[in-house]
Amino acid sequence: MLPPFSCPRQFATIAVMATPFTQPLLKVEDLSLSFGERPAVKGISFHINEGETLGLVGESGSGKSATSLAILRLLPPTATLTGSLSFAGSNLLTLPEHEMRRQRGSSIAMIFQEPMTALNPVMPVGEQIAEAVRAHHPALSRREVSERVLKAMHEVALPSPEQRAHDYPHQFSGGQRQRILIAMAIVNRPRLLIADEPTTALDVTVQAQILALLNRLRQTHHLSMLFISHDLAVVSQVADRVAVMQHGVIVEQAPAAQLFHSPQHAYTQRLLASAPTMRTDRSRPLATLA
Ligand SMILES: Nc1ncnc2c1ncn2[C@@H]1O[C@H](COP(=O)(O)OP(=O)(O)OP(=O)(O)O)[C@@H](O)[C@H]1O
Ligand SMILES: [Mg+2]
């Protein structure tokens, strides 16, 4: 029997402005997916309202990234999918591919965990952000594209965008590269941002800065966000609600404060107990996950 969980300061949920949520923007119902014969996600359901952030947490291999790739229809042909995925009223599973391409990067954008591999090393970063703009707005003039690029670079607080737009990814720090990827994701004003472990490769100080940036952007852009992480402390800083995944199943879903204060499922309780906090008794080993 686990002791009752008292919410440590580390998990204190930041009061992200209470937004009056209305219709779900994204609705996932009974989604299952397998790679060949091997199931990766087994009948999960969740929704994300306008302006809301859902944190998706769970151990490695629990199906978090597969779920996000399913939403973007970026799974390999070996994957089979059942269930329903609706975004702003359209069924993403039956949308023709050219329509889906239009949604990707415009209405639904994604930021990936490892900024170095997601950026083209031999192209100036401003040009890479410009490509994202041109892919969805081919009729814009060079000047209009450039204005959007610089505005996005300003919004993610990259220093001196006018000069730095000409620099290559290796000329930026890890945190700055992640800001470039975020600029690329928001430049077309998406309604839903999927962030798959966006701060895992960063040290804690830079991680805090990126989380603050995402929180600011979601308010100024009224963004909905699916924030994926294995780190509950990180999720507690951005999520309004949290879904916990284990072995392809969502075992618990609740508003963030409720989940961190009174987790109901044994796996969530173990997950919380296995994370060190300032109050952890260092004379005893941390709880481990089976
Ligand atoms: N392209 C693929 N082909 C075959 N199996 C895959 C593929 N992608 C993922 N899987 C399998 O699907 C399961 C879920 O993987 P997924 O990448 O979604 O995990 P995850 O929760 O994102 O883990 P992590 O925290 O390590 O990123 C795993 O068993 C994984 O091996
Ligand atoms: Mg993953």
Image (tube, rainbow, N blue to C red):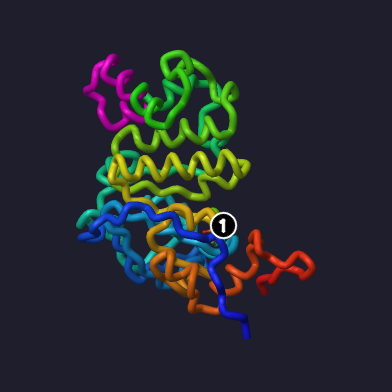
Residue 102 higher or lower than 268, as above or below? above
Pointer 1: what residue?
Answer: 231
In the image, farthest residue toward the bottom: 1
Q: In which quadrant will I find the N terminus? A: bottom right
Main SS of the magenta part reads helix
Q: Position of residue 16 (x, y in %)?
A: 37, 53
Q: Position of residue 155 (x, y in %)?
A: 37, 30
Identified at 45% across, 18% down, the residue is 160
Check residue 183 for magenta coloring: no
Identified at 53% across, 68% down, the residue is 7
Q: Name the residue type under label 1.
A: Asp
Question: 264 and 226: which one is in front?
Answer: 264
User: Which of the 4 image quarters holds residue 5?
Assistant: bottom right
What segment is highlighted magenta in the picture? 131-149
**Ligand 1, image quadrant it occupies:** bottom right
Q: Is residue 217 visible?
A: yes
In the image, farthest residue toward the right: 283
